[in-house]
Amino acid sequence: MPLSLDTRQRAMLLEMGVRVWLPGTDFAPAAPAGLAALRPLSQNPERAASPAASPGRLPTVQRGDGANDLSQIATMDWDALARTAADCQACGLCAGRSHSMLSAQAGRRARWMVVGDPPDEDEDAAGQPFTGEAGLLLANMLKAVGATRGELAPGLEAAYVTKVSKCRPPQGRVPQAAELAQCAAYLQREIALVQPSVILAMGRFANQVLLQEHPQEAALPLGRQRGKVYRYQGVPVVVTYTPQALLRQAADKGKAWADLCLAMDLLQTPT
């Protein structure tokens, strides 16, 4: 994709640690200003959301009693979905939860959707995905492509950010495939409500769920999954590194920018 970057995008790329040079340009980027702290389907984008659930008392999703309860999730509105996730006991991940990663306050439609790996201890304590330095780096990545997870501002469009599981695994253990499959009901409902045009899949476990329609690729290392367009519930999926991984391995930031360019291409290509 030909790069056409304005001053703001170049500044954000510098904060990501990605230097961009184009032949024939004499761009000298100014030092970027510090970022303010962030506050926390199977159809095409024109698909309509399912009818809202009644605002009455919600059933608790109990462990081992999945089928009927999970089918109710598919008709819930944002408030019902958030309350149900906060009380969910459908799998063993609930034992590690202090706060659910699903907030009704975050609910809105957005062309960009970011799905990360299960929450860590800091994210669980804060009750929101991508906190601290990882959250600031994600903010820079999104702003570089004209999006934001926070308050909308001129020139920026909404990005919805979530986690593949809504609970932190107990003691930070590895989540089991069956647990991720249970929690996927929440993610599928989020997709139906957000109606994204592209999903950024960040991390091994996010890819395990979002690439389930592509089993051969799902088994590959993340580095070999990159550079392709997948589908989940009918929505294009682009695989990239987590902000946490980029903080540990800064050399991969250029690859992450290439992944963002691929996602931007999808937004600019008529479906």
Image (cartoon, rainbow, N blue to C red):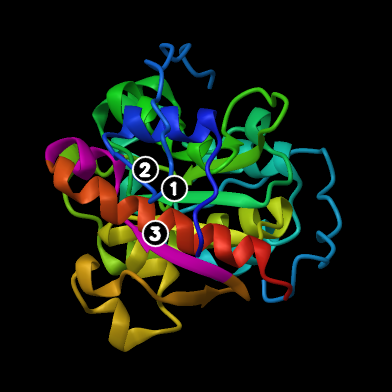
Place of residue 37 in the rendered image (x, y in percent of width and height, measured from the top left): 46, 13
Amino acid identity at mark 3: Asp
Amino acid identity at mark 1: Gln
Amino acid identity at mark 2: Cys
Of the image marks 3 and 1, the number of the one nearer the N terminus: 1
What residue range appears in magenta? Answer: 236-248
Instruction: Measure the alpha-carbon separation of dots 3 and 1.
Output: 35 Å
**Whether residue 261 is situated above or below residue 220 in the rendered picture:** above
Can you identify the residue that label 2 sits on? 94
Magenta stretch: includes residue 244: yes
Element carrying mark 3: helix
Name the disc covering residue 89, or none.
1
Of the image marks 2 and 3, the number of the one nearer the N terminus: 2
Element carrying mark 1: loop
Could you tell me which quadrant the C terminus lies in? Answer: bottom right
- Is there CB contact under 8 Å for labels 2 and 1? yes
**Whether residue 235 is situated above or below residue 130 in the rendered picture:** below
Q: Is 246 situated left or right of 48 in this image?
A: left
Between residues 96 and 59, which one lies in front from this camera angle?
Answer: 96
